[in-house]
Image: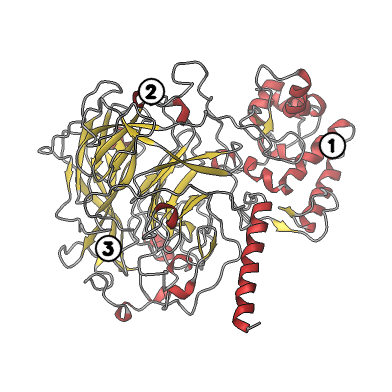
Amino acid sequence: MKMSSLCSVAVLLSCLVLLFLAKESLSHPLCNDLTAPLTLKQPLSFCQFNGSVCCNSHEDLKLQKQFKAVNVSGSCSSHLKSLLCSKCDPFAAELFRAELESRQVPVLCNSTVSSHKSTQSLADIDFCTRFWSECQNLSVTNTPFASQSGDGGNSTIYEIWKSRNDFCKTFGGSSDESSVCFNGQAVSFNISKATSPSPSGICLEKLANGSFLNMEPHPDGSNRVFLSDQAGMIYLATVPSQGSREVLTIDETNLFLDLTEEVHFDAELGLLGIAFHPDFLRNGRFFVSFNCDRVKWPECSGKCACNSDVDCDPSKLDSDDGATPCQYHSVISEFFTNGTYVKPVEVRRILTMGLPFASHHGGQILFGPKDGYLYFMMGDGGSKGDPHNFAQNKRSLLGKIMRLDVNNVPDAKAMSQFQLWGNYTIPKDNPFTQDKNMLPEIWAMGVRNPWRCSFDSERPSYFICADVGEDKYEEVDMITKGGNYGWHYYEGPLPFNLSTSSKTSKNSTKITNPIFPVMWYKHSDVNQKEGSASITGGYFYRSSTDPCLYGTYLFADLYAGVIWGGAETPLGSGNFTSSRIPLRCTSDSPISCSSDTDSSSSSSSSPPLGFIFSFGQDNNKDIYLLASSGLYRIVRPSRCNFHCSLENGTSLVPSRQPDRSPPSPSSSQRLHNSVSTLPMSQLGTSSLLVR
């Protein structure tokens, strides 16, 4: 056998081993200190965990000494030991980080279970009550409860919390079929799926013509939305109610904001994001993310992302699409308005960064629903294969998701210490503030071109981003604090062929523990002939309009004109499967979908959407498709003759789920997701945003 054949066999075997390990393993959350679980050769002696754990032998010994210092006996002894050792359980880590805050005591299972549960089952689940009953006379000294005692830890649990209700209100959490909590045993996700029936299809109505890139609901909770196009215009529009058969009317003569003079609009460049301050109704602050051209606009000026800090020399870069390196910039600008009565004015430039190439700029901005900080999604800067490995470079903001504090203006000391790129400060709990080698703005890294991210409105700790691939895969990632999503060493679930990038940086350092996507699809699944694809991220569907979509994560492909739905099974596990959902346009759409589709026919094809640029959501949580052919809204499935058993009230819509920090897939995330092969839909006009 020739050496080349041996190499081929070796590569094949390596891939098969990787796939086997991935399929057989479970997704692991990060440990409490945001590190990956350890793999021990021998079980822990006190906590007796083996395999992947969050404690080493030294930490295990410390827990044993802490347990002995409490001097507890009887049935409470086993409860306290299990509570202390839960810190070593990698699947319990999320219970210490519930509500995005660090806890000393994990979320204890409480008695809020379904009525059909048996008494014995309730006793098994209601760990909080059992702990109170058997440990209420326990002194909190040297226990995890001491931090919340308020008296230095010199009292008993009963003396501090007085009743079971108060104790379990402080430390307890729901233990119904849909949530995860600590019941004194090893944490697992063997819970039933609490979600809607699988949707038979998605019914759309067309509300407007025109092409929009961003849609944000008005912060006043009304039926008004802000729409922006890629060229730089922002409109304020009123959304008609569901079932009214009315169109969405935009007064194009009365723009909310016109930035066409500042915005450079071309292919992947333009106005890419808008975000309203959480306190907008009182302070009138909102933010716009866009690209500018320093040749055409003198105020387009900032530090180049290709610089000596990242071992990059702009003078050695070739021009890209006719532009010199860092001719184009990414800008986040703050504006002020008092609603629709005063035209917005720019009050400060939050961030300006020169771009080495003319593509992969991300550009979306979002405010965290819990922390109030501004998240900024930035791609790797462009060019094939991220040749300078910007996405993995600790001193580069390219290929990163950033988290900025825009409520505090930096002083001279902060500007000097952190070498900031604009007028913002660094949140103290950003993951890399203590790492002198890592830029402190970074929340997560290793992304290629994140195109549309969202926080789940019901579980805000679920932060999902779609990341555009290059050669073979498009992916959906669960973004976690300090996470590394692998690019350019990984694309989707498998290693990326770096040989396709002839200019790969010599200083590249391979990573050992990338976070793999929770969903993905191959380019060939979308377009077998050309192999082209570009993912468009969406939202978890939380509207009551189509109850069979409830809890489903919706995403699409720019070129294919189709939608996939991702279902997490079981809830809280971080394990998703996705499938294509058929699309139809209702025959009584306010604007014709320009399709010959017979809505009564089950064999109807999808409406010709063109390119699906983005998704939108209004204050009713209804979901919209922002496509090149117009603006579409998801409506009741029966309007397209799709069947949903929940639409007529025959069953209940799944109840709201408690927010728990989702598990973060480790490098052993199982490769379980696939989507069915589908034909290309009619595309229509030529594309912008070729990502």
Q: Position of residue 363 (x, y in %)?
A: 33, 54
Residue at the spot 51% in from the left edge and 31% down from the top edge: 198
Which amino acid lies under the numbered mark 1 shown in the image of this protein?
Ser
431, 532: nearer the viewer: 532
Q: Label 1 near label 2: C-beta < 8 Å?
A: no
Q: Mark 2 vs mark 1: which is more N-terminal?
A: 1
Position of 172 with respect to 336 (left or right) is: right
Residue 485 versus residue 69 in the image, above or below: below
**Secondary structure under badge 2?**
helix
508, 687: nearer the viewer: 687
Q: Residues within 10 Å of mark 3 (few under 14, many from 20)?
A: many
Residue 440 versus residue 506 in the image, above or below: above
519, 675: nearer the viewer: 675
Q: Mark 1 vs mark 3: which is more N-terminal?
A: 1
Residue at the spot 47% in from the left edge and 16% down from the top edge: 649
Q: Say the numbered circle drawn on residue 329.
A: 3
Which amino acid lies under the numbered mark 2 shown in the image of this protein?
Ser
Placement of the N terminus among the 4 image quadrants = bottom right
- Which residue position holds label 2? 638
Nearer mark to the viewer, of 2 and 3: 2
- Which residue position holds label 1? 78
43, 691: nearer the viewer: 691
Q: Mark 2 vs mark 3: which is more N-terminal?
A: 3
Q: Position of residue 355 (x, y in %)?
A: 31, 66
Q: Position of residue 335 (x, y in %)?
A: 24, 46
Position of 375 with respect to 334 (left or right) is: right
Nearer mark to the viewer, of 2 and 1: 2
Q: Residues within 10 Å of mark 2 (few under 14, many from 20)?
A: some
